[in-house]
Image: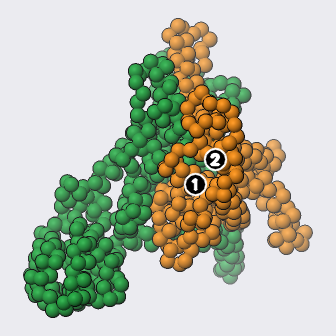
Chain colours: A green, B orange
Amino acid sequence: MSSIAIPGIKARTGATDRSDSLRPLALAAPLLLLLAFSFGAPIVLLLSRAVYEPTIANTLPQTIAALRADSGAGVPGEPVFRAFAADLKAAQAGGTIYEFAKTLNTRLPGARSQVLRLARLAGQDPAATKEAIIKAAPLLGEDQGWAAIRSGTNRFTSFFLLSAFDLRWTDQGTIGAVPSAQAVFTRVFGRTFLIATLVTLATLALAFPLAYVMTNVRPVIAGIVLVLVLLPFWTSILVRTAAWTVILQKYGLLNDLLLWLGVTSDRIELMYSRTGLIIAMTHIQLPFTLLPIYSVMRAVQPSQLRAAQSLGGRPFTVFRRVYLPQVMPGVLAGCLLTFILCLGYYITPVLIGGASDQLISNFIANYVNVELNWEMAAALSFVLLASTLGLYVTMTRYLGLDLFKMG
Amino acid sequence: MLSPYPTTAERIRVAALWIWCVLVLIYLVVPIFVPVPLSFNSGSFFTFPLAGVSTRWYEVVLGTARWRAAIGNSLLIGLGATVLATLLGTLTAIGLSDPKFPARRFVVPLLISPLIVPVVVTAVGTYLFYARIGLANTYFGIILAHTVLASPFVVVTVGASLSGFDRNLMRATSILGAKPLTGFLRVMLPMILPGVLSGAAFAFVTSFDEVVVAQFLANAQQRTLPLEMFTGLREQLSPAITAAATLMMGLSILLLIVANLLARRSRQAGAPAE
C-alpha cells in the first residue's frame, strides 16, 4: 500500500485492508472451527477435569454446612456425622452413591467399600450414632479420612495435579511427598524421558552417518537410499510394531540371527522387554531424525570444507569447526522431533514393552479404560501436554524447523 | 568421499562408514518386509523356514465376517475423513497462500498441532467430549476426529503446490469478468489438482492407519482394520495379522508413492518459469 497523507483516503484504504484480510481468514474458518470443536474443546474439557471435581461437593451439601459450624480440624463432632449419613442416604436414593464412592476412593484409598456399606446402614437406620458410623466406616474415625473429605468439598482442586508429581497437601497445610509406596508417577515420567532420550541418541547414531553418506554419493544412489528411508516412514506405526512383534519372538528372526552369529548362546527374551521396545521405537523414529539432518547437510557447501582443508585443517578439525556448526540446527531439530514424538508413544509400549516399560500415555489410557479415574488421566495428560508443547514451541521458535518442508 | 590420495587410515574410515550405513539400511528396510513372506505361510507359526506356501491367511482376512466388517468400516471412515479433510484443508491452504492472511504466526502452528499433541491426549479428550454431546460410538464422530488428524497433511501439501501459483492469474480471471468461484474451478483448481489429490491420499492413509482414536471412539460394530489388528496382537498372535499387515502396508505405500509423484508434479507445474 502506498502511503497517502490524506486522512479520508487513508481511512478508506484501511477499510479495504481489513476486508482483504478477512477473506483469506474466511476460507480457513471452516477448518479452524472444526479444530476448535473436535480438538480444542475436547482437550480443554479434559484438562479442566484435572482441576475441577464437583462430585464430592455436590453429594455432601449437608455435611459441608455442618463442617462449617464444626470447629477445629481432625475428626469432627456428632452433627457432622449425622449430616454425612443423611447425605449418603440421599445419594443412595438419587443413584449417585457409586460415583461419589469412586471419587472419594481416588483421594482416600479403601474408602469405596466403606462408603457403600455406610450408605446401606444410613438407609436402614437414619439415627445412626457417631460410633456406629465409625464402626461401619473406620476411615471416618481417622484424621486423614476427614482431611480427604474436607479438601474434596472444594470443587476446584490441586490434588490431582500434585499427585501427578507424587506430591500432596500435608495435614499441616504444606506440600509434601506422598508415601513412597504410592509414588509412581515421577518414576513413570522419569522412565518416559529416559526411553525417549535413549531412542533419540540411538536414532542420531544411526542417522547421522547415513545422512552424511547420502549427501556424498551420486544423486541416483542418494535417491534410492531416500526411497529406502521413506518406505518404512510411510508404513503405519501399527504395522511396523506388528512386524517387530514377529521378529522379536523367542523363536523369531532376531534370536535366530543372534544365535547364528554366535552373539548369544541361548535364545533371549526380547518381547516384553525394554531392549525390544527401544529397538522397535528406534526403527520407527529413525526417519524422523534423519530427514531434517539430511536436508541441512545437503545445503552445506563442499567448497568450504575444501577451503578449510587446503588452509591446513586436519580432517577432524574441519569436521568439528566447519561442518558440525552448519549441520547442528538440523541435528537438533531432528532429535527434538523424535524426542517429542517418543514422549507420546502408546501403541508400541503396549505391544512390545513389559509391565515396567509402560510410558505415560499407557497410564493415561489405563486410568480411562480400567480405573475410570478421569481426574488422574487429566492431570497426567496436562503434564504430558505441557512438556510436549513446551519442547515444540522451543523447536519452532529457536530452530525455525518448518514441518511444511518435511512432506 | 575419498580424497585424491587417500591414506590407509582414511580408506579404513570410509569403508567402516559404508558398512555402518549398509547395516543401518538393512535395519530400516528388512523389518517392514518380514510379515510379507510369513503371510503366505501355510503353517500357523511365525518362524522361518516356511512350512509351505498358501493364501489361507488372506482368505481369513478377506473372507471372515469380522475382518470384512473391519475393512468396510476402515474404508467408510477413511473416505469420509478424506473428503472432509481435503475440502477444509484445501480451502485453508488457499486462504493461507494469500499474503494478507492475518496472524499467520499463530494460525499455522495451531493447524499443525494435531500432529504434535500426543495422540492419547487427543483420543481421551475427544472421547470425553463426544460422550457428552452424543457423538461417541458414531461413525460421524470417528470421521470428524480423523479429519482433525488428517487435515494438517492436506494443508501442507496443497500449501506447497500453491507456493508456486501465480496469484495474478486469479486477478486476470476477475478482470475478464469471471466470478471468484468460476475462476477457482476453471483456473486455480486444475493447476493445483495434483497437490489436492496428493493431500487426499495422505489424508486417507492417516485415517486408514489410525488406531488410538478409533480404540476410544468405536464400539464393537465400528471396529476398523487397524483396531482389529491391534486387538489381535494383544490377545493372540495369528498369522492372519501378518496378512492384514501386508495388505495395509501395500495400500499405504502404493497411495503414498502416487501422492509423492503427484506432489512433485504439482510443485514443478506450479513453479514459475525461469
Q: What kind of residue is marked 2? A: Ala
Q: What kind of residue is marked 1? A: Glu
Measured as percent of width and height from the top left, residue A213 is found at 59, 26
- Residue B92, which numbered label? none
Measured as percent of width and height from the top left, residue A131 is found at 9, 82
Residue B29, picture quadrant = top right
Chain of the residue under label 2: B
User: Which quarter shows the N terminus of chain A?
Assistant: bottom right
For label 1, count other residues whose C-alpha is less than 10 Å away and answer few (under 14), some (14-19) or many (20+).
Answer: many
Measured as percent of width and height from the top left, residue B269 is found at 81, 48
- Residue B228, which numbered label? 1
Mark 2 — residue? B244
Report the residue at 39% width, 44% height from top.
A354
Measured as percent of width and height from the top left, residue B169 is found at 83, 61
Report the residue at 75% width, 46% height from top.
B258
Q: Are marks 1 and 2 on the same chain?
A: yes
> Residue furthest toward the bottom?
A127
For the residues bearing labels 1 and 2, Cβ distance under 8 angstroms: yes
Residue sitting nearer the eye, B204 or B4: B204
The reply to whether residue A257 is in sight is: yes
The earlier-in-sequence mark between 1 and 2 is 1
The reply to whether residue B100 is in sight is: no
Disc 1 from disc 2: Cα separation: 9 Å
Residue sitting nearer the eye, A50 or A210: A50
Q: Answer with left or right where residue B211 lies relative to residue B198.
A: left
Residue sitting nearer the eye, A315 or A194: A194
Chain of the residue under label 1: B
Report the residue at 69% width, 37% height from top.
B54
